Image (spheres, rainbow, N blue to C red):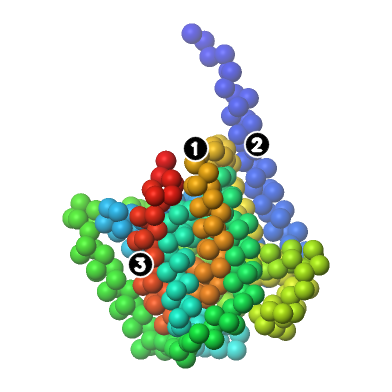
Amino acid sequence: MADTGMDAPRGVFTIGTRGLLIVAALAAVLFVAALAGARYGALLLIGLGFGIALEGLRFGFAGPWRAMILRRDPAGLLAQLVAIALVALAAFPLLASNGEELFGAHAPIGVAMIGGAFVFGAAMQLVMGCGSGTLVNAGSGNVVGAVALPFFALGSFAGAYNLDWWISLGTAPVVVLSGTSGLLATLAGLAAVAALVLWLAPAQARRVPRRLWIAAVAIAGLAILNLVVSGQPWGIVYGLGLWAAKGAQAMGGDLSGSAFWSAPANAERLEQSILTDVTSLTNIGLIGGAFLVSVWRGGLAAKLPRLSPLAWAATVVAGFLLGYSSRLAFGCNVGAFFSGISTGSLHGWAWFAAAFVGAWWGVRLRPKLGLEV
């Protein structure tokens, strides 16, 4: 039977659509660069890179932790540890030689920090997404992620609003590993965790797929670029809280009662465009990058899951708790675990331990709340 050429228009449309996607992404970067400056355009581009790498290579944080808990599959967690180690190799000397321009993700260990990390670990398993994962899921058309995201932002805003009260419960001094000895200690700690998860894993699961090695290198490279261009490590939570704070302010809300939002630096950011906020730009880019990959592959994953009212309510509550708890814990998997450890903050290790225990409980809560379809 002769070829009728019926598929040709669809092929042309696909190629054209992909071309339009690339043009639109570059136009957005150039628009931000022209409006706010080249540095901010570069940050949007880095954010797009994060979104493309995370969605395109199926690299995440919540899923690999779940795989390790349920099946003792260490591949995704090992890739995370490798990415952190690669960033640490660059970040430690960069911070040491550029102490006035670059800052690490350093925070104290405290009661609220540990409790917040535990709650975050549980909540991220309920919505199957951490900070970056929720953004990626929303950008790729995942309905649960899209529902959780606005409540994540509201939670981050609320957690920041009364952060001082939580800190008053008690914190230890900030402990930062630095210099060659600090780097070696960090790498040794990452190697020890890797050895432990390999020991716990069955022999047939001790293999990391090639895509995860590529993803680890790509994410690490982008995180180093983010540190150099923005002056601070990759983060998620602050930008989401800022969006909600701007919304509250636009509706006439008075934020002067919050020590956090009335602090000079934060009050100034509330008055400025989000296009000049480092974390907001990379968050927007992350959503956009995930959207680009999904459309490139053929369409958004917008199928509505068949969840009970209880499950949808759990999604809303978990989304809010993700934001609230991560603000108390000084970051999510990205800002505390990934960036904290890779820039020498001891709180990153405490966050990891508390959040992983929380994730264990979160995995077991999912079926009880009707979230396992």
For mark 3, give the secondary structure.
Answer: helix
Q: Specify few, some or many for label 1: CA neighbours under 10 Å numbering under 14, 14-19, or 20 or more.
A: few
Mark 2 belongs to which amino acid? Gly
Q: Quadrant of residue 162?
A: bottom right
Q: Are marks 1 and 2 in contact (CB under 8 Å)?
A: no
Q: Specify few, some or many for label 3: CA neighbours under 10 Å numbering under 14, 14-19, or 20 or more.
A: some
Residue tagged by mark 3? 357
Residue tagged by mark 2? 16
First along the sequence among labels 1 and 2: 2
Q: Is residue 208 left or right of residue 307?
A: left
Q: Is residue 317 left or right of residue 126?
A: right
- Place of residue 183 in the rendered image (x, y in percent of width and height, measured from the top left): 38, 83
Q: Quadrant of residue 46?
A: bottom right
Residue displayed at 26% across by 56% down:
72
Q: Nearer the viewer, residue 42 or 57?
A: 57
First along the sequence among labels 3 and 2: 2
Residue tagged by mark 1? 306
For mark 1, give the secondary structure.
Answer: loop
Q: Nearer the viewer, residue 268 or 339?
A: 268
Mark 3 belongs to which amino acid? Val
